[in-house]
Image (cartoon, grey):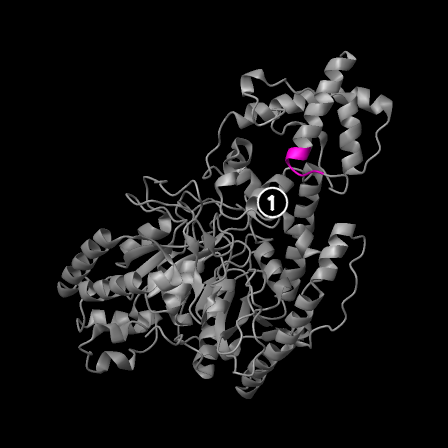
Amino acid sequence: MNDLVRHANRRAFLAACASIGVTSNFFAGVLYALASQNTQVSQNTPPSQSPTLQIDDTMIDEAAFLAGVSITPGQKKDMLVKLNQQLRGIKTVRKLNLRNDVPPAYRFDPLLTTRFPTEPEPVRTEKAISEAPKIADAEVPKDLESLAYSTVRELGELLRRQKIKAVDLTQMYLARLKRLDPRLHFLITLTDERAIAQAKEADRDIAAGRYRGPLHGIPWGAKDLLAVKHYPTTWGAGGFEQQTIDADATVVKRLDEAGAILVAKLTLGALAMGDKWFGGRTRNPWNPDQGSSGSSAGSASTVATGCVAFAIGSETLGSISSPSTRCGTSGYRPTFGFVPRTGAMALAWTMDKLGPICRSVEDCALVMQAIYGPDGSDLTVNPAPFSWDAKFDWRSLKIGYAKSAFEPPKQEDSRPDDASPEELKEWEDQKEDRAAARTRADYDRQYDLASLDRLKNSGIELQPVQLPDFPVDAIANLLSAEAAAAFDDLTLSGRDALLTEQSSEDWPNLFRVSRFFPAVDYIQANRARTELMRAMAELFSKVDVIVVPSSSGTQLTITNLTGHPAVIVPNGIRGQDAPKPPAIDTGDDDSIGGPGTPLSLTFLGNLYQDAKLLAFARAYQTASRFVNLRPPGFE
């Protein structure tokens, strides 16, 4: 290759690097990941006129410098042919234009063995739930809107006894959605025609004695990453506003079969990040100056304000936990591989989970009864039983608590090691913010400690446990790598510019960064994940449930990587003496609510022991009376 062509190729390579923000401080991946970026020298150069990018030894030098590795001249010569072959192979695979719903050829299984719980599969009948609620014996109010905050269990009993009509209940929730959406921005699409037709059918069936169970006639909302035939499925993202998928998600089908009534498709942060979507920002009803957190933002906000009886959310790394904490709802993240994700947007195939957000833990269990189990399409779903029984003797369980997570927040503020000058400047600029966060954490700790006292006073012998000490944030880079693959076409086509958020912490930049995650290190991170799974299996060989503050980000990352289930319950309302929230909600901290806002507590369970976990969480919720909280101003 002559010097002129070599120089042009080097310029093309460096232009490609510059276009994606690569600097000498950036840890790059293998060379062909760099070289296979957009081969256009500039955005104004049409593809037909762009030079074909070939790898040469100068480019290897540049890539080696960025990656921090040393390569000898002899090694470079041996590498060239293979690197160009690999580059051509990558381009060939890209031409397949893989859809978002095409999973990798491998599957994540949280189980380290093939053993499942031995309990027999329960019969899904009234025997599996608690005694009829008192509301069913009371006189039904003339104003049906006074039932807006009733639990699924309460509403279900009223419907079963034909004290209220599904059509009337549906119309009431549709009216509340329309009225409150301008204040909270939680609605993407009303499914009113579908809902009214379903409600009429429910009334006919119930009147004829064809009662399907506790969800029959119950209005619900779907996070808008679930496909619903004949309606847009926007994923909350610019550029996808008109996307339609000609099939119903499995969860939607199963709730249809249970007689539940879909009234709305609800907001999520763009491509399941945060609470900002193409139409604005979904608000926290307890403090509308803040977002509702994400990404199941609309699901939590609508449940919290009595606009649906329950909602379905999803979690990859906190998207059920975070908005449930912020909005004061009961959230349940099932064991990975318990609920099929067919028809749901894929973000990270080895971490995505679907679960309910409700006003009570028992409601979460009732919804789970309808949606769990294999569907023949999502091959990650295991045939494990869900043996829910509200009268299960939870006192037989061994309860641990993450001791260090309940200790006072650390006061030291050490400079980060090996930080770049830019990182050090950012660290210095955020000193006041970190100090304020410690003050808030110190205030909130009283609620966490009160929960331990409450458990001890109920006769529970709490066992102190220590969560595994692993570099979980580094392992969690797997999420961004999978997400970058799921939305590969956005990065390559430049359509990522249509997404609302474009900061260094948002998807467009994270997708680009993930292209430089070396394949070998991706596998190493997965191997570390296996060791983390083993450590958690050892921990859960000693206890059945672990109590932990929801604010502990370590537990959130660990359990999303290992697939363990979690139940998030409200744990009180901050007093008027609570530290004031920051002026700007960056979305980085769920615990900034300020005076008069809710806190939550998290219960972790063993794999596929979700029913026991829910039974314990329900018992705590009943004893604490932090259930069905109502944000002021949304009656």
What's the residue type where badge 1 is placed?
Leu
Which residue is under mark 1? 510
Is residue 482 at least partly visible in the picture? yes
Q: Quadrant of the C terminus?
A: bottom left
Q: Is residue 6 left or right of residue 207?
A: right
Q: Position of residue 194 (x, y in %)?
A: 23, 52
Q: Residue at x 46, y 35 (%)?
A: 99
**Residue at the extreme top of the image, as rendered:** 2
The vertical placement of 429 against 614, above or below, is above
Is residue 120 at least partly visible in the picture? no
Q: Is residue 27 left or right of residue 181?
A: right
The vertical placement of 364 against 594, above or below, is above
Q: Residue at x 65, y 71 (%)?
A: 436
Asked whether 227 or 270 is in front, the reply is 270
Q: Residue at x 76, y 56 (%)?
A: 424
Q: Position of residue 453 (x, y in %)?
A: 58, 85
Extent of the magenta region: 18-22
Q: Position of residue 543 (x, y in %)?
A: 60, 71
Q: Main secondary structure of the magenta part?
A: loop
Q: Position of residue 550 (x, y in %)?
A: 56, 69
Asked whether 108 or 515 is in front, the reply is 515
Q: Based on the displayed image, in which of its 4 quarters is residue 260 positioned?
A: bottom left
Q: Quadrant of the N terminus?
A: top right
Asked whether 203 or 612 is in front, the reply is 203
Q: Residues within 10 Å of mark 1 (few under 14, many from 20)?
A: some
Q: Based on the displayed image, in which of its 4 quarters is residue 139 positioned?
A: bottom left
The vertical placement of 618 against 273, above or below, is below
Kindly state the secondary structure of the residue where label 1 is placed.
helix
Asked whether 157 or 624 is in front, the reply is 624
Residue 513 in magenta stretch: no
